[in-house]
Image (spheres, rainbow, N blue to C red):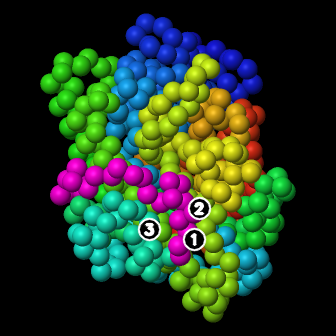
Amino acid sequence: MEVKRLDGNRFIVEKNGQMNTNVRLYTSEMMLEKIKKDRTIQQAINAATLPGIVGDVLVMPDGHEGYGFPIGGVVAFDADNGVISPGMCGFDINCGVRLIKTNLEEDEVRSRILKLSDALFKNIPSGVGSKMNIGLGIKDLEGIAQEGASYIIRKGFGLKEDIKHIEENGAMMQADFSKVSNDAKSRGLHELGTLGAGNHFLEVQKVDKVLDERIAKAYGLHEGQVVVMVHTGSRGFGHQICSDYLRTLAEYRHKHGISIVDPELSYADITSKEAEDYLGAMRSAVNYAFTNRQIITNSIRKSFEETFGKGADELGMDILYDLSHNIVKLEEHEVEGRKRAVYVHRKGATRAFPKGQDEVPKAYRAVGQPVLIPGSMGTASYVLCGADGSMKETFGSACHGAGRVMSRHQAVREIPAERTFESLRKKNIEIRIRTRKLVSEEAEWTYKDVDEVVRVVENAGIAVPVSRNVPIAVVKG
């Protein structure tokens, strides 16, 4: 395996042997050395052997080893002759991030941060297997899978205007609930409105620094402003769907005598019934996740209302944007001078469309789509704006966060929980968390430097930094 520098922060592993295409890496020298030590690059090389790939296999600067395909990976397959691979979308389908604005300033929130943190921790269940009973039945779950966030908004969980600032307007079309297993339905029914565990979180943040005044104004952001970031996905519903279809596609592979370098990359031809079934179920999970974040948004607004004695409208609690990390989408992109329809697999990568694209919400179309980049617990997060380079370079994609550099097992062995608690105390960050083990697993030292990750994205012309936000309070499972 020979990694060559193209220029700046771009590196390439050139097509050879079984590879049908090149692997392109967006990284810095220091981060490159880290990903050479795990299977990140080898997994991308394995993916490059699959049929029907359009362009290069891409790894974003937050890239690290995942199941079959790197987290931080992007690949596009021809819409007529390509394949669909659940492992290249991920288990937590539509794991994503939402940012909610307020008109509160840091001092106003600091004075009530204990009460606010308690309210958020009480109103939004978190942790492994967390559940929330809001009186929904199986017919509601079907409505959510088909219609997404708009279904739950009609039941009083939010505002009509919220839809305008959610990717896909809160619902992917052609979801097919009939392709979802009973196990997935059972797991999903009572987990709506919950955070889960792992790297999922809720943070109260302040805008520490505005990095692009013009775009920040378009987004309604200013220094000192308090915002809320939520990171979670489709919970057990999406995880079960991925598990189910990994088995289905493994059977498809054996049935058709498909030879593959890594069974975790099992796939189905795009024209097959198995691919169609997976896409119908996957879209159901996408819509579930949008709905999950919508219910959580309602609980966040309720928590702020309880704490500050004002309505959410008085507090300016509008959604800036909500976007997905793990998803497969049919999109049109220009490749080698001509438009092509492709199925873009983004796994731990987010869409980053620039100005002028129809998919960008009308309010942001003159500047570009917001790109939300969470850091790690205790470090900064960023709001970026999609740039023209993303359409030329990465099928309109960017990184999705900082990216891990240490396994959870290693973190538990090497990072005492008290070290993280002490670091958060020094930074004046309030924390609510259910297990000490998770404090070690999610410590800031287990992730890459988010500032460096964002610099790589900026230098590559993929996205423009708009604001750097820092946490005031953290809520986790």
The number of numbered discs placed on residues in the rendered structure image is 3
Q: Residue at x 15, y 24 (%)?
A: 255
| Residue underneath mark 3 | 150
- Residue 179 x %, y %: 22, 50
Q: Using the image as rendered, state which of residue 58 and residue 444 is in the foreground.
A: 58
- Residue 98 x %, y %: 56, 61
Residue 201, compared with residue 66, is above or below; it is: below
**Residue range highlighted in magenta:** 159-184
Q: Residue at x 65, y 57 (%)?
A: 362
Residue 176 in sight in this render: yes
Quarter containing the C terminus: bottom left
Q: Amino acid at mark 2?
A: His
Instruction: Calculate the distance from the C-alpha at mark 1 to the C-alpha at mark 2.
Output: 8 Å
Residue 454, compared with residue 477, is above or below; it is: above
Q: Amino acid at mark 3?
A: Ser
Find out whether the residues at labels 1 and 2 contact each other: C-beta distance under 8 Å. yes
| Residue underneath mark 2 | 165
Q: Earlier in the sequence, mark 1 or mark 3?
A: 3
Q: Determine whether, in the image, residue 174 is placed left or right of residue 366.
A: left
Which residue occupies the extreme bottom position in the image? 309
In which quarter of the view is residue 88 placed? top left
